Amino acid sequence: MNAPELHELFTLPQGKNKVEYEEDSRIEFAGTFTVHLEDHTLGNIIRMQLLQDDRVRFAGYKAPHPLEQRIQVKIQTDGQISPHEALMNSLESLKITFKGLQDQFEKQAKSI
Amino acid sequence: MSEVYRGRAPNIEINKITREKIKFTLSGVDSSVANSLRRVMIAEVPTMAIDVVHIHTNTSSLHDEFIAHRLGLIPLISENQDNYDFPRDCKCTGHCEHCAVQFRLKVKNQEGGVLDVTSRDLRHLSQQGNDVRPADSDGPILILKLRKNQEIDITCNARKGIGKEHAKWSPVATAVFKYTPDIYLNQQRLESQFTAEERKEIVNSCPVGVYKLNEESNIEVVKLNKCMFCEECMRKGEMIITRSASALLNVHDNVVRVSQLKDRFIFKVESSGALKPESIVSKAFTILTKKLDDIKQLIPPLINTR
Amino acid sequence: MSQNSHQEQNLLIPAFLQLRGLVKQHIDSYDYFLTTDIKQIVSSPSNCCVLSDYNPDFYLKYKDIRVLMPSIEEDAVISSITPHECRLRDLTYAAPIEVDIEYIKGNKIICRSGLEIGMMPIMLGCCNCVLRNKSEEELAKMLECPYDPRGYFIIKGVEKVILIQEQASKNRIIVEIDSKNNVVAQVTSSTHEKKSRTVVQSKGSKIYMKHNTLSEDIPIAIVFKALGVQADQEIFQLVGTQKQYIDALGMSLQECSILNILTEKQALRFIGSKIKNSKAAKTGRTKIEEARDVLATVVLSHVPCENYDFRAKIRYLGIMVRKVIDAMNDPKKVDDRDYYGNKRLELAGQLVGLLFEDLFKRFNSDIKKHVDKIFSKPKSSKGEPFDVITAMNKKMITEGLNNAISTGNWSLKRFKMERAGVTEVLSRLSYMSALGMMTRINSQFEKTRKISGPRSLQGSQFGMICPSDTPEGESCGLVKTLALTTHITIDQPEEQISKLAFSLGVEDASLFSGDELYSPGVFRVFLNGQPLGVHRDADFLINSLREIRRKGKISEFVSVVKVEEEQQIHIACDGGRLTRPFIIIEKCKSKVEPKHIKELTLGLRNFDDFVNEGLVEYLDVNEENNAVIAMRHENISEDTTHLEIDPFTILGCVAGLIPYPHHNQSPRNTYQCAMGKQALGIIGYNQFLRVDTVLYLLAYSQTPMVRTKTIEIVNYDKLPAGHNASVAVMSYSGYDIEDAIILNKASSERGFGRSLIVKRQNSDLRRYNNGLSDRLVMPPVIHGDNPPPSIKKFHALDKGGIVAVGSIVQTGDVLVNKETPVNKVDDIEMSKLTDNDFKPSFTCFKGPNPTQVNRLFIACNPEEPFLIKTVTIETRPPELGDKFSSRHGQKGVVGLIVQQEDMPFNEQGWCPDMIMNPHGFPSRMTVGKLIELVAGKSGVFQGKFKYGTAFAGDKVIDCGEILVKNGFNYTGKDVLMCGTSGELVGAYIFSGPLYYQKLKHMVADKMHARAIGPKTALTRQPTEGRAREGGLRLGEMERDCLIGYGAASLIQERLMYSSDVFIASVCESCGNLGYEQWCQFCKSRLNIVKVKMPYACKLLFQELQAMNIRPKLNLSSS
């Protein structure tokens, strides 16, 4: 009765895009990405990956409310790249990491 | 933290696979990667589970909703779940062969005594979907019991879903990682400042028996992986130092120090029976990659709108 | 004795309770009523026959009375019934009362046996109940739960308990100090016939007697003289000839001579003139006769007095005076009113006995009235001679008993007793609540009075009454609970005991003058408060009596007490005393030896054998004072006479659920006692066969990991109410502040905290006086997918007009489509009625969630020809805001339900079901909970249940060792990793299994909000309360805030526009309210204006007008 509707886990809220961006009005090269229907699984790895990047000055994420299915990733860069590029880069390198791990894993699993 | 593993390449190494368990070591990544993998295995690897139940007859002692709940929790072998769509993605209304597997549970106790109705009594309604069936490797799963002349007749649809929606779709019993222990023993001080008796005390302080005294009665780490970071050994070491005269020298330097390697994780995944453990892991990687990919594709349009 | 055998003696407790059941006191007392008391009532001289004032030949004599087995008469067929059938069909579980009579019909003597005079409600489990001594299998066939406590009644399908009533003991002298600092000795006499209170009181230096039939206090010397003690010396001897008595009595004696009352006659005349409501004039008796009569029958009515032989009364009065003087000289001699030895508990048997006697008297007086009416008329020679059986109204007794038990109003005309709330509906919220109710003691004190004495725990209650189980708030300490082994005695015949006492050397008091009674070195012997005589060797008498009792020659519940200071021996065999069993110690050795225990475990002996062989005996509160009781074996010393069987028995059955209660702060245990009764669980093996209005159940109830012995004894392990939750004590997310708990979503989906709400809705097809009856109607056919709500609500109905089993209904859906005839008065034939002659009166479902119809019952009973019961079961997983509690008075609501992957986990894959905030511990000091966790955790690894029995239980040291052995931290703390980030949690987390109860308070039943909705007809203001979909009140204090803030428009909106705004027509010229633009006062519509005001304001004006007050509205525009 009190629980959030189940479909909220899978369907985007009305009028929202999966990923939204809002530029920080006060700080240069900074902005917040809102990713709907994602949780700590993604937020935490993106944040950690962003922190690897020397051009990223600040990276952090939060899940603003436990009953809302979205996370916010805040990125500030040093200007060499935009927050978007930083995010793209980190997503790409994460993808490579996982892909590599998966290949490695599957190869080993097959051989056993 | 990042410095620790920056140099090392991500690496995965399977230690052991059995029918329901897998153990592997993930290294060269930080805790966020390990944790995401764990989270995806628990909550986002899809399986099949009974979701919609139609009860035609039920004269058993349990009421309808109770039985429906029990049916839902039966793990179904879902190796071929890729062949099915999520019900919410399927074009059909209701159910079709692309999104559901139908079962029928029709049992009547005619003999008397108590009859166990188990997952083995679940029959497929049609030919297709035979690949999805109750996991049975540990014997049948009890659903309910019938007394003489009690009867149940139920049709149910198994559908695809993920653990986030309901725990019945979670393919794992446990999916967990632990940090690799890193034990530092200041052997020099242990030998010079501690008596053999005191060293033995340190060895015995460990509840899981990580240490052993070797022939020279020096402390030796024998079962590193057993360590559970309880720090009993550290406390014991400190205690011995403080009670001895050498306390004045340098208290802050521990003779025994237990810490974690921050880039090496020992995973243990135990399947519920729905999927083979190695498929759970590899499926988790696929899902993670897809997640990243999906978002990545959505970012360039945002740049343009700026 | 070895350590081992010490523990074995605890086996006596289960043996005791197995033999006894948990509600033996109720059943015993009712058995006594049915077998003995009822016969005594009927054979007592005042009840046993009915005579006629007009026909001296007529008589009706009762020779015997019996209560048969429960049955029901339907269509002239008598069939036996089971309790469960009564529950289902709304019947009364009652048995016929049969009498054997002898009476005069015409001029013949007629004997008639087996005549039914009414139906007696039968207590479940009593000697006349079909469930008595039945095996589990036989009970199952009768659809009964073998663990049901029984001891209640079923009246019209409702389970009713007659609560144990506590009161000051009757027929005993109690010495008190009143508000004016006078010493008062009072005695409440109570016999079958009369009830009165006699008071002997000091007033200044004089002593008076007070009685409610006398308008004034009578100087004590006058009373003595009236009773025939004319010599002053004799009076002194009756009280005591020591100096202090003579001094104290002197002034009182002087009063006699002042008033010039020296003879018996003068004294009687004096008393006669003080009688209230004197009937002397009416009956033509003299005052002297009347006074003598009052003294004989009313004053100290419990002291026997035959043929105006006042000697027993004189002695009794002497004792009372002596007590007053003693207390005047030594305040220590004042009795303690709250001392539990001075209390008696009234049980179902006694209460129903009182009621039955009253009804039987009325039954007889009705017969007498009828008989007199017949015989007062001139005899008609024709026809059958009058048969008295026709004058018997069977319904009177049946209905009198049923009404009293179902309403709880005990009104007894002859005692002018008017008591409400004697019975209660048996709470079936959980097994424990039912059990708790059966052991509850209600006290007669007013709840409103601010008195602490009767509320506080008295030392003499030790072991008899549970120190923890009492409600909080107004009835705190007034409502108590019996401890585990307490037994309440029933009345025992006095004759045997007094005979025995005399043959043991008691010298009969009636043979003595007063002086000899009080000679030093002599002990006065009392039986049930009445002086029996004196004995010169007190120890001999006491020891012999006890020896005889231990041999089983007299009842084991007879108590013998020596009061050294008063030189008195009290023997008691009356009913309502609290007793409990002890092991007898002789010469520092327990009489219960290991071999006895061994025989017990082998089933070769039962608890009764222990009592009969004198190994164990019962002591009542008073006799406990004569005993030196060792708590444990190691405390036995030379003086020890008894040994406690097990210390944990001082707790009751509800408090016995708490593990390690001796480590908790005391109020926490009290809180748990209140909450244990609200926990959802299994209420009985027949729970799904029952048809209670609401039944809260738990889907997968678990037996607790950490048990107590009480849990096993009361079968809580078989009918548990809770889950063994894996708990991590840590802070998480901030949604756990103020005792909120975090729940694991996966756990709840797997069945944790899943509750079932079974609801029953009744709907009966009534038959009216004109021969018409309600009818069931076929529902309208539903077309299309989206029918209007007025049609859709019929969707669940079958063609017969009753809901289909298995369908899912929502609030507002029709369950029974019933129609009632419009005309319920005139005689019309049913077949001639058209559909228009009926109006719909369907029964609707009400509930927060969609619910499945589980069962239907269609039954009939003598009152209702067609009774339809619909049973729905709703499954409710835990949700945000549901209330949970551990067994240590720590309650909390669910603050957040978290995905499993977000929960912290340990390296073995464990993750909590529940997270509890550690701030709950420091201020609550529930150390027992910490120990429960450690013990439970160690038990998990051992694969064994752990025991947290009060004052015993598994030791923390041992539990810690087991944890260490299994590779865990000694203190129960674990290294956890954060579920969201994967990093180590920066502290060791105390985690393990704790038994958690889901309480009945659930959000779904309470959540409520409204925008617009129903309004009350009178005031047009929104209705009140959730059930009526009411508004949320902006109360006075809220209003004050708004006034203070100056938010005038908001006030106007809340209090008028959003409530009961009304546009009134007001006449500007006369200031009266008008109606529809018309002023009735001015007979004009010229000066009418519209004014907005609250409807309540308009209503007030009209009501004032109705009282001839004219409110005038002076209007001005702003």
Image: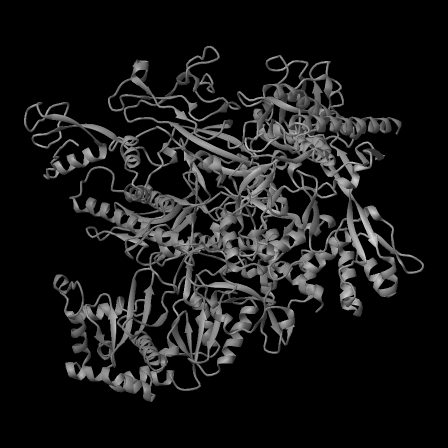
Query: Between C843 and C520, which is closer to the camera in this rendering?
Result: C843
**Which quarter of the image is occupied by the C terminus of chain B?**
top right
Query: Between B18 and C917, which is closer to the camera in this rendering?
Result: C917
Please give left or right for residue C605 compared with residue C1092 in the image.
right
Q: Say how many tags the image has.
A: 0
The answer to whether residue C1011 is visible is yes
> Residue C832: x and y, percent?
30, 14
Q: Which residue, as the protein is rendered here, is positioned at the far top?
A: C784
Q: Which residue, as the protein is rendered here, is positioned at the far right?
A: B215
> Residue C540: x and y, percent?
52, 80
Instruction: Please say if A90 is above or below C286.
Output: above
**Which quarter of the image is occupied by the N terminus of chain B?**
top right
The answer to whether residue C80 is visible is no
Instruction: Please say if C221 is above or below C854.
Output: below
- The picture quadrant where one finds residue B49 is top right
> Residue A34: x and y, percent?
59, 28
Query: Between C219 and C450, which is closer to the camera in this rendering?
Result: C450
Q: Which residue, as the protein is rendered here, is positioned at the far bottom?
A: C243
> Residue C504: x and y, percent?
48, 77
Instruction: Please say if C993 is above or below C857.
Output: below
Instruction: Please say if C247 is above or below B185.
Output: below
